[in-house]
Amino acid sequence: MSGPTPQNTIRLPVNAQRWSALTFLHWPVAAAVIQERLPRGLHVQTYEGTAWIGLAPFLMQDVRVPPLPPAPGWSTFPEINLRTYVRHDDGTDGLWFLGLWSTRRAMNAAMRMIGLPYHHTEATIRPVGDASLLYDARPALGTPARPLRLRAAVRAGAHISAPTELEGRLTGRWNAYAVRAGRVWRVPVTHPPWPLRRATLDLLDTNVFETMDLPAPQVEPLVHVSPGVDALIGIPRPAGRTLPTTTHR
């Protein structure tokens, strides 16, 4: 896994949102397991020969189209994503989502139209004090496909002042990719560096690997938590076109 591409400068964001109460669970996985799921033009990234899968439950907050304010009662909701890390033939890198789940049916339908694999779920996220998080997701009534079950309890530990190289590569990504009309599209993203804490996983009960036809992990995950970051989403465009970029400051 080579170093991540520089962060994007997004002058005309199409969406703004905050990602809060977030947990990163990461497992190593054979690169071939990931590569066979990728569209032409995308290649799995490895670190010391190993690919990684990340499961990230979090609270999506204040979702809006700038300069409009968030819609009351709608713009904050749980989301869960299962991701991996890829590089495109154009030299950029970022996230490939194996699956995404949220509690907003309308948003899920809209995101599927642009090629992101969103599914509906029922879910709650509950902070316990300032150092614990409880996640509970369950299949929604009438869910037609990819039903998700997730119960997790996470305890935050020490703050990370200087992330390791691997931690930086697993969290600092500035593009997401999707396939629409048979072509890979890139969605640019920008946000401040994640404030990270190492964490302990007290409970994990999930069917996400079975649901996504992935081999079950044989080792315990790397666990990190974050209070969150504010993010801007840029205009999706066909991969291969130049994106204006800058080093994050």
Image: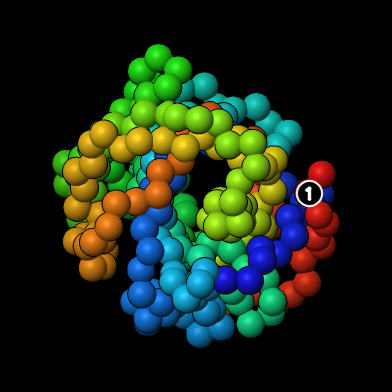
Q: Is residue 192 visible?
A: yes
Write the residue at 31% across / 28% down: 134
Write the residue at 41% across / 35% down: 199
On the image, numbered disc 1 is attached to which residue? 248
Write the residue at 47% across / 54% down: 111
* Quadrant of the image occupied by residue 58: top left
Q: Nearer the viewer, residue 34 or 241?
A: 34
State left or right for residue 208 relative to residue 233. left
State left or right for residue 233 relative to residue 47. right
Q: Is residue 47 above or below residue 25?
A: below
State left or right for residue 101 relative to residue 236. left
Badge 1 local density, few (<14 within 10 Å), some, or many (20+)?
A: few
Q: Is residue 208 above or below residue 46?
A: above
State left or right for residue 148 relative to residue 18. left
Give the quadrant of the N terminus.
Answer: bottom right
Q: Is residue 87 above or below residue 156?
A: below
User: Can you give x and y, in whole percent of width and height, for residue 177 in the image?
Assistant: 55, 66
User: Can you give x and y, in whole percent of width and height, for residue 50 in the image?
Assistant: 44, 71
Quick one: which residue is furthest to the left in this view? Answer: 141
Q: Is residue 125 above or below residue 41?
A: above
Quick one: which residue is furthest to the bottom in this view? Answer: 40
Q: Is residue 118 visible?
A: no
User: Can you give x and y, in whole percent of width and height, for residue 8 in the image?
Assistant: 75, 56
User: Can you give x and y, in whole percent of width and height, for residue 189 in the image?
Assistant: 66, 52
